[in-house]
Amino acid sequence: MTPASPDNAKKSILLVDDTPENLDVLKGVLAPHYRIQIATNGRLALKIATSAPPDIILLDIMMPDMDGYEVCQHLKNDVRTRDIPILFVTAKSDVEDEAKGFECGAADYLTKPISPPIVLARVKTHLAMHDQKRHLADQVADRTRQLNHRNQELEETRIEVIHQLGRAAEFRDNETGLHIIRMSRYAHLLALKVGLSEPEAEMIYQAAQMHDVGKIGIPDHILLKPGKLTPEEFEVIKKHPDIGYRIIGKQHSPLLNMGAMIAHTHHEKWNGGGYPQGLQGEAIPLAGRITAIADVFDALTSSRPYKKGWAIGDALALINKEAGNHFDPDLVPLFLTLRPEIEAIFNRYQDQQESPPATTA
């Protein structure tokens, strides 16, 4: 007999047969090289296999109560045992019997009376294949963990870049960083209320933070002008959605693409009177319509050196009044139902300038 490798001495084999003489023969062939477990019926085999899974199973077919085919099917349907190689060892030598064995999930099919060298060779081969399969699975799992970790790092970096892009626009405006936080959280609330999934709402939350990135391209004397803009100056301001869209550009990242779309469409109006494209109704992407409400509401309720913020009730009243004109008439009622959550965000993220009480009607 071919001696087993040192590694094989650690391997365990479960022999399943209802005939003691058959078990003795197999044990005599394999015991010098492997650790042997024995089961004299199918139910005992299942109990042993699930409690202390062997490295390989040699299984008879013709057994009372539960035959080998049924045992094999149970083993292959159990996550704890489905990967264990099963070798049928049986007197059933018909082609149909062998085919049925492979259909059940067996790795090999040996007929009685056995040839000891063939049994040893087949067992050794299937153990080596099983080890290789497990090693490959471990490598795939390890590589998948590495890729997931890398993807998480890339996603975190991408989100941080998005936040910094949003802050870059805020630094050039009279807004504060809290405007981005509040309006994006308002947008997240409304996205969920509309019925979007949490991942979809989260994407709008992140992407909305880039809505005003185009203000980077607006000259300071216009962007920071404390007084009323002239019509010519307002035309320059109206270019910032296009600028933002070009700054972000078309990317492979769905998040960045949504950011570009929101930057481009958050000043469009439901009635077609917005800019820069004059889109109307549902031609305006949903994320743009959601961001428009969140952005205007926060602009109204925010105090700045040149203006006092509106009371939340007054701002909501204006949002309601503009349903069907500035804003999507289906989104406005949903936004109004979110008043408690909106007030919580408003009170949590306050600007340094004095703001009115959140509950003022």
Image: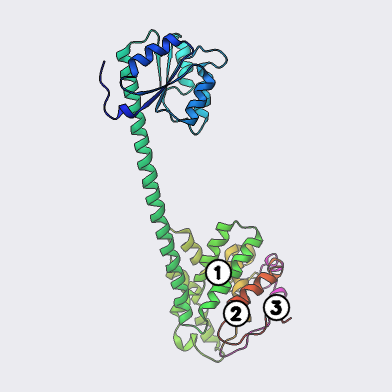
Q: Secondary structure at mark 2?
A: helix
Residue 323: in magenta span:
yes
18 with respect to 333 (left or right): left
Disc with the residue nearer the chain's start (1 vs 2): 1
Residue 318's tag is 3
- Quarter residue 302 falls in: bottom right
Residue 98: where, in percent of width, then height? 45, 14
Colour mapping used in the image: rainbow
Asked whether the viewer can see residue 279, the reply is no
Residue type, mark 1 in image: Thr
Residue type, mark 2 in image: Ala
Residue type, mark 3 in image: Leu
The residue at the point 54 percent across, 21 percent down is 43
180 with respect to 151 (left or right): right
Residue 85: in magenta span:
no
Residue 148: where, in percent of width, then height? 41, 52
Q: State whether residue 95 is above or below residue 82.
A: above
> How far apart are the alpha carbons under marks 3 and 1?
21 Å
337 with respect to 210 (left or right): right
Residue furthest bottom in the image: 227
- Quarter residue 126 falls in: top left
Residue 299's tag is 2
The reply to whether callout 3 and callout 1 are in contact (CB within 8 Å) is no
The reply to whether callout 3 and callout 2 are in contact (CB within 8 Å) is no
Q: Residues within 10 Å of mark 1 (few under 14, many from 20)?
A: many
Q: Secondary structure at mark 1?
A: helix
Q: Nearer the viewer, residue 310 or 74?
A: 74
Residue 192: where, in percent of width, then height? 63, 61
Q: Residues within 10 Å of mark 2 (few under 14, many from 20)?
A: some
Identify the magenta region.
305-333
Q: Residues within 10 Å of mark 3 (few under 14, many from 20)?
A: some
Quarter containing the N terminus? top left
